[in-house]
Every structure is written in structure tokens, then in C-alpha cells.
Image: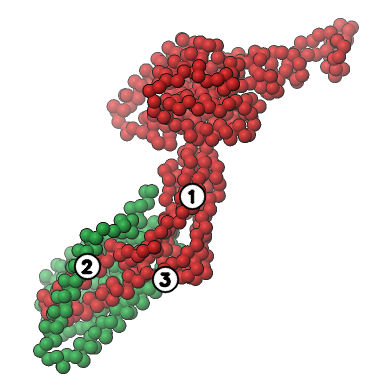
Chain colours: A red, B green
């Protein structure tokens, strides 16, 4: 740690120079005497004491959702006296101070301990890097300073925010595991189905006494099986629009996380395919560990520029099962993704495209003006025409502006999807 | 609070030349010095305060040259000490602006400043007394000695300013914290 003179020395030297120059000019000793306190301050004020400071840097969480708070606590313990130390915790982008300050000054006596706390709000999905505070030790008059960096790297995973959803697109086909969808096939379940005559092996508790009394022979009530479904989220990362932290990919990733959480809560198996310059996927699975895997993958979802078009044929069936409900999240800006979605629909995949409108997020990044308003309206009209054309081509599309609740957009699909699912 | 204290110190600095000679040239210089110095104190700008203090120094020299009063070491020491406190206070205020200030920081700083000012006052008193004692022994040579010493000091100060301004340095040390808040 080396002590360096600060800009304040220039001010002191300027005044000393003026005083002595004027003393020569006017031949007055008063001005020489005036300069003496300034010269003494210049000499004495540059003395910097070696500081021995121990710092404990803690972050309250290593995993958060967007808009949740993390508390950063610094504990400073001085082995020797520290006349003045300045600390600055650099804030990464898309992180806001909710409480406290990230810049502080402390004076510590030998053995003294000080706690300093700040609360950060994380505004966007990211790997939040907190590297530890910058330290600046000041001399008594601010004429010298020494800098150091306390390295305490902390990484906090800030996952996309999860919204509550009530209107989930129902899958057309179910799988063989127990879930929440009523299957047309008969078996164990709680949803009553047909009534048939009693056969050896039937449980007595399934006897339908009302039908038995009316028909004079034993009849039993059959039940529909409750099955789960495979859901694959197809995230378009071929193109991106919007300001940092609020791009279309960010909005789509937030929607994908919300959908994944909602389907996993219904015991479905959920997988993820990031369809972009880099084709990445997560195999369908269920449970809390799967949600964690999906969130970790969504955290890194970003546009990787490429001219190479990867066909969906490259995706193995275990990642994209033919019976799965495919939810494609895309702004539909890249023709390659539109072709891939049309290809899946043509191959009779149960595909629902959630078209995230890039107009609103792009509008947020541009300064308000009449020209921008007209351009946004024209773009919205063009987009509406594009969606209509795709609908005529057989795609099921949910138009979502990316600003309002996803649930409202999903509710519009409810009328157009069959209630009863097909047996897997 | 720091801004008010700095503005009060600026008032003291510009008040001394006026007290010596409340005449037109000195008054105009002190008015300009007061305007620049007070602005510097309010916006916590060391550069503006330095400019205001320099003008006050010039006004003080003009007042001394025109009024030709007897040498007054007390007023000079007060002037010099006030300048030290003013620069230290504005620089400190600039640094802690918009930052958490721990317990005892301000009190500790004031203690350090007072100790250094006391040292400066002691130095000025010793030199003044030394000059008074040696004066009769060096009749006729006192003024040339003072002038040569002051000229050398002025040259050294200018050289110091030039070396500080032109020397390559770690910019992060010199940059005020406000410049780094956007990180």
C-alpha cells in the first residue's frame, strides 16, 4: 500500500506560491508569516499511518429472484488505529440501493469493530458479482491517500421473477405418470367415468349402489386416470430487442420460468430448449431439482450471434418428445425461428407459440417523439398482420405484449383449446 | 453544515483585507473573492475555493501595500490558519458528500486539523520570534533575507504545483469519489 499525494496539494501549493510571490512583490513579512501554517500543513498533513484493517464481507443470499433484496454486511475490525478510511462497494448494473449507502467513511480506534450494512435490490436476471469494497486510507488533512482492494468475490444468482398463473395451456396428450390431467383412459382415479356391470376383481368400494338397485345387478363406476404431461419450453434466443435488463429475451425468460414453475407444480415433466446461436437444452423432468436446473439455464439465456441455422431435427426425441406440449416463446423477429415453429406444427406437435411483442420493450428504449409513436404503431400493425398469417398457416399463437400479466394473455387461449386430453 | 462552516471561513478570509483597508480596489477584489469562494463552499469545490482564497490573498497584499500598516503577525497567522481549515473542510465535505459517515469521523478530523493548525501557529510564532531576535543582529540584511527566502519558497511552490499536475499518477487516488459512484 503506497501513499500518494492528492489534488489538494495543488491548492495548498498554489496558496503558498501566491503568498510568497506577493511577499516578494510587496516586501511584507506578513505574507511570509501567513504562508507558514500552509507550509506546516503541507509537511505534517502528508504523513499517512499504516493501517491494519480486517474486513469480513458477507452477502445474505446466493440465490434470489428478481426484485428481491440482498443484504451486504461489512464488518471492519482495526488492529491499529485507523484515522480515516473510505469504503466504496461498486454496484453492478441493474442493482439498486434499497437501504443504506454503498460509500462510507469510518474512523476506528485500535481493536474497534464496526458493522456497515446495505440492502440491494436486484432488478434483472443475472449472475450478480460483488467483488468486495475498494478502500482508501486518508492522511489527516486529505493531502495523501492510499488505496487497496479487499477481494471477497460473491456471486448471487438472480433468477427471473415468477408470476402466479391460473390459466395454463392444457396439453393435448398425457404421459404415463400420475399427474393432474384427467385422461380418457379408465383406471384408478377420482374423476368418475362410465358405469358397467360388476366383474370379478372389481373393488366393492367402486360398486354404484344407485345403478345396482335400479338394474338389479351389481354395477361399478369406472374412473378416469389422472396423468401428467410433458411440456417443453422452446425459447427463441436468435434475436433480441430492448434496453438492458428489459429485453425481449429477458421477458421471455421470465415467462418461461413462470410457466416451468406452474407446470412442475402440477406434477408435469418440463424441459427447455434454448433455440439460438447456441442450441442448449434441459431434458424434461419433474420436481424441485428440475426447476433449479431450468432456472439456472434460463439465467444464462442470451443471444449468441450466428449465421448457422440449426434445424429442430437435431434435437433428440428424449429432449423433445413427440407427445409433449411445446410452448414456444419468441418475438417472432427471426425467420429461422418462424420456420422451426411451422416445422414443428406441420409434424403434428402440440405447439403453442407465445409471441412476446417487441414493440413495447423497444418503445421503452427510445425517447418519446411523434415519429417514434408512428413507427411503433406501424410496427404493431405489421406484427398483427404477421401473426394472422401464421394463424392461417395452422399455428396456435398467443399474443402477449410482454408488459401486462402473462396470465391474462394465456386466458385468451382457454376458449380455443379442447378441455379433454388424449390418452398418452 | 459543512457548507455553512466553509462559507463562514470564506467570510473570515475575505473580511481580513477589508478590515485593513476598506477602500475601492480592495473592496472590489474581496467582493469577487467572496462570490467565488462562497460558490465553492456551497458546491464543495476545492478549485473554486482555491481561486477565491487566491483573490483574497491578492486583496490582502494590496491592502498591505496601500495602507502600509505595521507588521501584524497575529492577523497573518489567523489568515493562514483559516486558509488551511477552509481547504481541508471543503475537501473533506466533497469526499463525504452522499456517503455514510461513521461515528467519530467528523470529531476525529477536527482534532487532526486543529493539531496541524496548532503546529502551524507554533511554527509561525517561532519564526516570528526568531526574526525579532535576529533582526537587530542583522540590521540592513533582514529584508534581503526575507525576500530571497520568499522568492525561493515561491519558486519551490510553483515547481511543486507543476510536478504534481504533470506527474503520472494513479488516477483513482486523485479522482473524487463522486466520479466513481456510477460503477
Q: CA distance from mark 3 to mark 1?
A: 32 Å
Q: Quadrant of the C terminus of chain A?
A: top right
Q: Which residue is drawn at the image coordinates 62% and 34% (left, top)? A: A289
Dot 2 and dot 1 residues touching (CB under 8 Å) = no
Marks 2 and 3: in contact by CB < 8 Å? no
Is residue A401 visible in the rendered image? The answer is no
Whether residue A225 can be seen here:
yes
Disc 1 designates what residue?
A: A153
Q: Residue furthest bottom?
A: B137
- Which residue appears at 38% of the width and 23% of the height? A307
Name the residue carrying label 3: B108
Image quarter in which the N terminus of chain A is found: bottom left
N-terminal-most mark, 3 or 2: 3
**Badge 2 local density, few (<14 within 10 Å), some, or many (20+)?**
some
Q: Secondary structure at mark 1?
A: loop
Tag shown at residue B160 = 2
Using a 10 Å C-alpha cutoff, classify the residue at mark 3 as few (fewer than 14 neighbours), some (14 to 19) or many (20 or more). some
Amino acid at each position: 500500500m503506497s501513499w500518494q499525494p492528492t489534488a489538494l496539494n495543488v491548492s495548498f501549493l498554489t496558496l503558498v506560491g501566491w503568498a510568497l510571490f506577493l511577499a516578494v512583490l510587496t516586501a511584507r513579512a506578513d505574507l511570509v508569516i501567513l504562508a507558514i501554517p500552509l507550509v506546516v500543513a503541507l509537511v505534517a498533513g502528508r504523513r499517512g499511518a499504516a493501517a491494519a484493517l480486517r474486513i469480513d464481507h458477507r452477502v445474505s443470499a446466493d440465490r434470489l429472484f428478481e426484485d428481491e433484496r440482498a443484504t451486504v454486511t461489512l464488518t471492519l475490525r482495526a488492529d491499529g488505529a485507523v484515522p480515516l478510511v473510505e469504503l466504496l462497494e461498486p454496484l453492478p448494473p441493474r442493482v439498486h440501493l434499497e437501504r443504506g449507502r454503498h460509500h462510507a467513511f469510518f474512523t476506528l480506534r485500535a481493536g474497534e469493530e464496526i458493522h456497515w450494512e446495505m440492502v440491494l435490490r436486484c432488478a434483472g436476471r443475472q449472475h450478480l458479482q460483488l467483488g468486495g469494497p475498494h478502500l482508501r486510507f486518508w492522511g489527516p488533512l486529505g493531502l495523501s491517500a492510499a488505496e487497496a482492494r479487499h477481494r471477497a468475490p460473491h456471486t448471487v444468482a438472480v433468477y427471473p421473477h415468477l408470476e402466479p398463473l391460473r390459466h395454463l395451456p392444457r396439453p393435448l396428450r398425457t404421459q404415463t405418470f400420475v399427474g393432474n390431467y384427467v385422461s380418457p383412459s379408465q383406471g384408478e382415479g377420482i374423476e368418475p367415468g362410465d358405469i358397467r356391470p360388476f366383474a370379478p376383481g372389481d373393488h366393492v368400494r367402486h360398486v354404484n349402489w344407485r345403478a345396482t338397485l335400479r338394474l338389479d345387478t351389481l354395477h361399478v363406476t369406472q374412473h378416469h386416470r389422472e396423468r401428467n404431461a410433458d411440456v417443453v419450453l422452446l425459447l427463441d434466443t436468435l434475436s433480441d430487442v430492448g434496453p438492458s435488463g428489459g429485453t425481449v429475451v429477458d421477458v421471455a425468460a421470465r415467462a418461461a420460468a413462470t410457466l416451468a414453475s406452474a407446470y412442475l407444480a402440477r406434477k408435469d415433466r418440463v424441459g427447455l430448449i434454448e433455440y439460438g446461436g447456441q442450441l442448449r437444452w434441459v431434458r424434461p423432468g419433474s420436481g424441485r431439482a428440475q426447476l433449479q436446473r431450468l432456472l439456472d439455464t434460463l439465467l444464462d439465456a442470451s443471444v449468441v450471434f450466428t449465421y448457422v441455422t440449426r434445424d429442430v431435427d437435431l434435437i433428440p426425441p428424449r429432449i423433445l418428445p413427440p407427445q409433449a406440449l411445446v410452448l414456444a416463446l419468441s418475438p417472432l423477429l427471426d425467420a429461422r425461428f418462424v420456420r422451426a415453429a411451422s416445422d414443428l406444427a406441420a409434424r403434428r406437435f402440440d405447439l403453442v407459440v407465445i409471441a412476446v411483442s417487441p414493440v413495447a420493450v423497444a418503445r421503452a428504449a427510445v425517447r418519446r417523439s411523434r415519429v417514434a409513436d408512428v413507427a411503433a404503431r406501424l410496427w404493431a400493425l405489421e406484427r398483427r398482420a404477421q401473426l394472422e398469417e401464421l394463424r392461417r398457416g395452422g399455428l396456435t399463437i398467443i399474443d402477449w405484449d410482454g408488459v401486462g400479466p402473462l396470465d391474462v394473455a394465456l386466458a385468451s387461449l382457454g376458449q380455443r383449446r379442447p378441455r379433454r386430453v388424449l390418452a398418452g | 453544515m459543512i457548507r455553512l462552516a466553509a462559507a463562514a471561513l470564506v467570510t473570515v478570509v475575505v473580511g481580513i483585507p477589508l478590515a485593513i483597508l476598506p477602500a475601492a480596489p480592495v473592496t472590489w477584489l474581496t467582493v469577487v473573492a467572496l462570490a467565488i469562494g462562497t460558490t465553492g463552499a456551497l458546491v464543495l469545490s476545492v478549485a473554486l475555493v482555491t481561486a477565491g482564497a487566491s483573490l483574497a490573498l491578492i486583496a490582502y497584499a494590496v491592502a498591505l501595500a496601500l495602507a502600509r500598516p505595521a507588521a501584524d503577525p497575529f492577523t497573518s497567522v489567523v489568515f493562514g490558519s483559516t486558509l488551511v481549515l477552509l481547504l481541508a473542510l471543503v475537501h473533506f465535505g466533497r469526499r463525504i458528500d452522499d456517503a455514510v459517515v461513521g461515528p467519530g469521523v467528523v470529531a476525529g478530523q477536527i482534532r487532526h486539523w486543529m493539531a496541524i493548525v496548532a503546529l502551524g501557529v507554533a511554527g509561525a510564532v517561532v519564526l516570528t520570534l526568531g526574526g525579532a531576535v535576529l533582526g537587530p543582529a542583522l540590521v540592513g540584511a533582514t529584508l534581503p533575507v526575507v525576500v530571497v527566502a520568499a522568492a525561493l519558497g515561491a519558486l519551490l511552490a510553483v515547481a511543486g504545483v507543476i510536478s504534481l499536475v504533470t506527474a503520472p499518477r494513479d488516477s483513482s487516488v486523485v479522482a473524487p469519489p463522486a466520479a466513481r459512484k456510477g460503477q
